[in-house]
Image (spheres, helix red, strand yellow):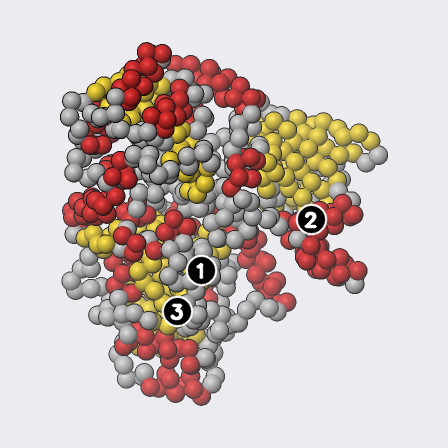
Amino acid sequence: MDAAPVASLPRRGGAPRARAFVADGGGLTLDVSDAGLGGVWATIRFRDAGSAGIARLVLSALVEGPKGLPEPVALTEAPAGGDDFLWTGRFPEGVRSLRLSPLSREVPFRLTAFAVRRRGRIALVAGALRRDPALAARAVYWRALGLKIRGRALLLRALEHRAETGYAAWIARFDTLSDPDRRRMRDEVAAWAETAPLISVVMPVHDPDPRVLEAAIRSVRGQIYPHWELRIVDDASTDPAIPRLLARHAGAEPRIHVQRRAQNGHIARATNDALAEARGRFVAFLDHDDVLAEGALYHVAAAICSDPDLVLIYSDEDKIDGRGRRFEPHFKSDFDRELLYGQNYVNHLTVVRAEAVRAAGGLRPGFEGSQDHDLLLRLTPGLDASRVRHIPRVLYHWRAAGGSGTFSDRALARTEDARLRALADVAAPSGARAERGPLGFNRLVRPLPDPAPLVSVIIPTRDRADLLDLALAGLLSGTDYPAIEVIVIDNDSREAATRALFARHAADPRVRVVPVPGPFNFSALSNRGAASARGSVLLFLNNDIEVIAPGWLREMVSIALDPRIGAVGAKLLYPDRTLQHGGIILGIGGVAGHSHPGIPESEPGYFARMVLTQEVSAVTGACLAVRAGLFAACGGFDADHLAVAFNDVDLCLRLRAAGYRNVWTPHAVLIHHESKSRGPEDTPEKRVRFEGEVRVMKARWESQLRSDPYYNPNLSRTSGRFRL
């Protein structure tokens, strides 16, 4: 972060005044105690140079808490194009200062402009009408009736509304470099001096269209970052134009080195030949018909300079057609071992420490079509996630034009088999096996010990015997897991049908009913069930869950027994077979929301995410498996502050903070008759309680809520539909 900048603050009846931020640890603090901003509607606009609309800081207002200590209130900004961000809202009463905190030590922010401007009522309503006319109209209506708080809340929702962005518009706003951007990058590279790493770009070539090969080479020569070499291996191309083109570029650019194989050895051998001659500390893989973004190697080098211990670096990517039109962007998650078992989501751009590639033996011949996936699967076991860096920028354009002659086109028939064999090799030492999953992707099946461990299924309930009966029938008769005990936590059931249901199961040694009277507190009820459990695995289950296939619990338990894994969640469907739960994404709607809500059961989701096992930040407590010892060690659910909402998210985040990975599996599928037992959040009392739980989550986990590692900062936080 550069030297503390100066902010522009409003002044009644006069010109704005300038005030310097004060460096405060890794962040910046701005004193606004004399600016009269408490309760004032205003806009904050700031610029984070080089961010391209990706949030790298948390903006907060500090107010005096009940004990006289400053408490942060998050001011959630939105990208406004380029490097600019915007927040519009009402400052909290008693605001004393503004605080900018970095989201990551490895990726610091660079504040170059910051201005606060008061907003009048007419301008606010006009802005709200542009964003969400219906909500803005409701806000005006309730304000006219004198209901200020309700009108204010609706106005804020309208001002925060963000329309979805098309990819072409996103490129124009956030992925188009200006001359000042290029100058800033070059100045930064010059400041790295001796620490700037040499990056070896390796490119196997075999009979591509000369035009696309020309474009690929020129994309390397046009890099803003100068410390590279391009190692090209011509894998016995038959087109005489190819060696001529390569010789011409090598003659014009001393950083380009060309070898020619006498015999065609396919992509693995050709790449290994390039690797053998590479001099760089890091190796970047480039196909002979693809294109690097001009800032690609700059961003890679910046990541290396910020953390020299990195082993694996990868970026987002898109596709490019014969006319140069970009489409189908893939905005990826941070490092996800589970997802990598199923598919090579890392793909392009991939950059690896050279010594790590050589230690792994390079690419393996015989795995053509999935040779990159095979390398990553062999490279990452035992690799700490802190040594993997995902750059959330589109740095690689994967050519999709027909007839380009890509290796992947010619190896398509063998890709699936090679991918499966690669996973089988990695899975074998742990006793797991690789199976063909949906759409031809991999599925890792972990073993269950013999005998299988006892699973304690904990179900809080209050009446609704019809739902509970369905859940119990599925557990006791429709599930093929051999060792189950069911603990029903009865929270003041009063109906005769419920008493009859309990009596019907009284003789079943697998079922226990534990009466816990008092107000509904999901966390306390679940903790009470855990304290009564005998099993080494706990499964928290809502009373409105319906079992539809027998193998679901085997799948969840086999994953939960992995000592590196914390909570495990299932694929939950609404009764109409649309998706209710595909994992939880942090930051959606302010705190957290579900992934891919409402898509049909058969839909694969964003780049097949809904048919592949993957890591997530959190899973729903409606169906959550966790080892009993781990649950106890992290303190269980927070019954004091999160009685109903977000207790599952909080538990999962505490598990992550302790070093465990939370996993969602699509291979455990159930029906969730959501909220049929307890009902929606539609009373004033429930709303007050819910708003208090929101405040708890934001105070406790604000930085995580702003930056879910398994989502992508370029995607909308309005919903979890993986859209711009």
In the rendered image, the vertical position of residue 439 relative to residue 349, given as above or below: below
Vertical placement of residue 219 versus 540, above or below: above
Counting residues from the N terminus, which is met first, the one under dot 2 or under dot 3? 2
**Left or right of residue 340: residue 144:** right
Q: CA distance from mark 2 to mark 1?
A: 29 Å
Q: Which of these two is toward me, 292 or 446? A: 292
Tag 3: residue type? Ile
Q: Percent from the top left, x then y, of residue 687? A: 60, 63
Locate residue 578: give its quadrant.
bottom left
Counting from the top left corner in percent of width and height, residue 97 is at 66, 37
Q: Residue sitting at 15 percent across and 26 percent down?
A: 263
Per the image, label 1 sits on a secondary structure element best described as loop
| Image x and y of residue 152, in percent | 71, 55
Q: In the rendered structure, which disc, 3 or 1, sits on the residue that comes first in sequence?
A: 1
Going 36% across and 75% down the picture, which residue do you hit?
A: 471
Q: Is residue 438 left or right of residue 527?
A: left
Q: Which residue is at the far right?
A: 13
Q: Which residue is mark 3?
A: 671
* Residue occupied by mark 1: 599
The three-letter amino acid code for the residue at tag 1 is Ile
